[in-house]
Amino acid sequence: MKMEINQISLPILTEKKIKLFIKRIDKIHPFISGNKWYKLKYNLIEAKQKGYDTILTFGGSYSNHISATSYACKKNNLKSIGVIRGEKHQVLNSTLEFANNNNMYLYYISREKYRLKNTREFLEELKLKFGHFYLIPEGGNNDLALKGTSEILDKNDKQNYICCPVGTGGTITGIINSQLSFQKVLGFPVINNSLYIEEKVASVVNNDNFTFINDYKIGGYAKFDKLLVNFVNEFYKKHKVPLDIIYTGKMIYGIIDLVSKDFFSKGSSILAIHTGGLQGNRGMEDRFGIKIIY
Ligand SMILES: *Cc1c(COP(=O)(O)O)cnc(C)c1O
């Protein structure tokens, strides 16, 4: 599949002789956006081949994964169950309303219980409650998801650096496994204490040509400051590339800051993966009263 690539022009890039490209996998589908499309792809095929009629998965109440899975299931005539962290609110937020409209059954569990989601006891409980289902773990990560994310890069992607945001690490794992030998992957984690993710990624990938950049978390998951919001809004106005506040905004902000600090040698080319996540901006706007242009 040929994906749109945007080259970004900025005085700082010209000055430092760096080329920056953004691979728009966010555009792969309006609702099954970005990396989530790749993670779901082989899982849905597998579920159907094995004769399942229901998918069950997990996520927070603003989760891009929940949003994408609900739509993908509807389109594939699969029932879907979303196990949601936290209590039910009277009025559904935009993400959960979307999932609900796609007929996803929303099952709320406490944060304490959510931590047990990978235990056998909890899965048994879910089976008793919901019967036979195909399980997609939180963040969509399993071997079939990694097979999918290893297709994000294609043979035309020849830049020296590949950059991608990191949540649970499934996306960067697929990217590292499929990069060319002269390339280097830079991961931009968004959660605090992400060392265990780095270690997990390191333990499963087939090469060690990658680095985690920990300086652009801006407070951690779903945290932000004014500077970031301004950056994302100005970036959209200047380049017509919409970014999300949680993942891609922090990565692009980080890349440009690194360029200004001479992290990249002259003549380098960078490919940043736009992993999507734009639906999450609505939730950030509603929760924090900020205005994001995207
Ligand atoms: C889910 C998500 C990520 C994180 O992907 P992982 O595979 O969990 O590391 C990155 N960017 C966006 C936009 C996402 O929605």
Image (cartoon, grey):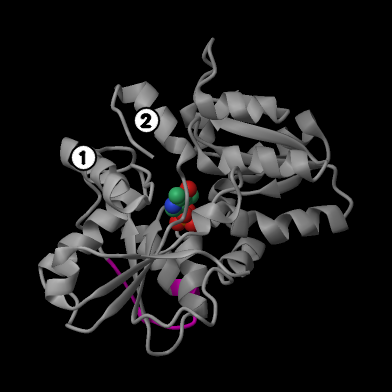
* Amino acid type, label 1: Asn
Is disc 2 surrounded by few (<14), some (14 to 19) or many (20+) residues within 10 Å?
A: many
Camera-nearest residue between 121 and 243: 243
Q: Name the residue under label 2.
A: 284
Which quadrant of the structure image shows residue 5? bottom left
Residue 138 position in % (x across, y down): 56, 46
Q: State whether residue 238 appears in this view.
A: yes
Using the image, determine if residue 67 lies above or below residue 192. above
Which quadrant of the structure image shows residue 59? top right
Q: Give the range drawn in magenta.
A: 203-212
Which quadrant of the structure image shows residue 228? top left
Residue 121 position in % (x across, y down): 66, 39
Quadrant for the C terminus in the image = top left
Q: Does the magenta stretch include residue 210?
A: yes
Does the Cβ of the disc 2 residue fall within 8 Å of ligand 1? no
Q: Do the residues labelled 1 and 2 touch (CB within 8 Å)?
A: no
Residue 199 position in % (x across, y down): 38, 67
Q: Is mark 1 on a helix, strand or loop?
A: helix
Using the image, determine if residue 157 lies above or below residue 228. below
Q: Residue furthest right?
A: 51
Q: Mark 1 points at which residue?
A: 230
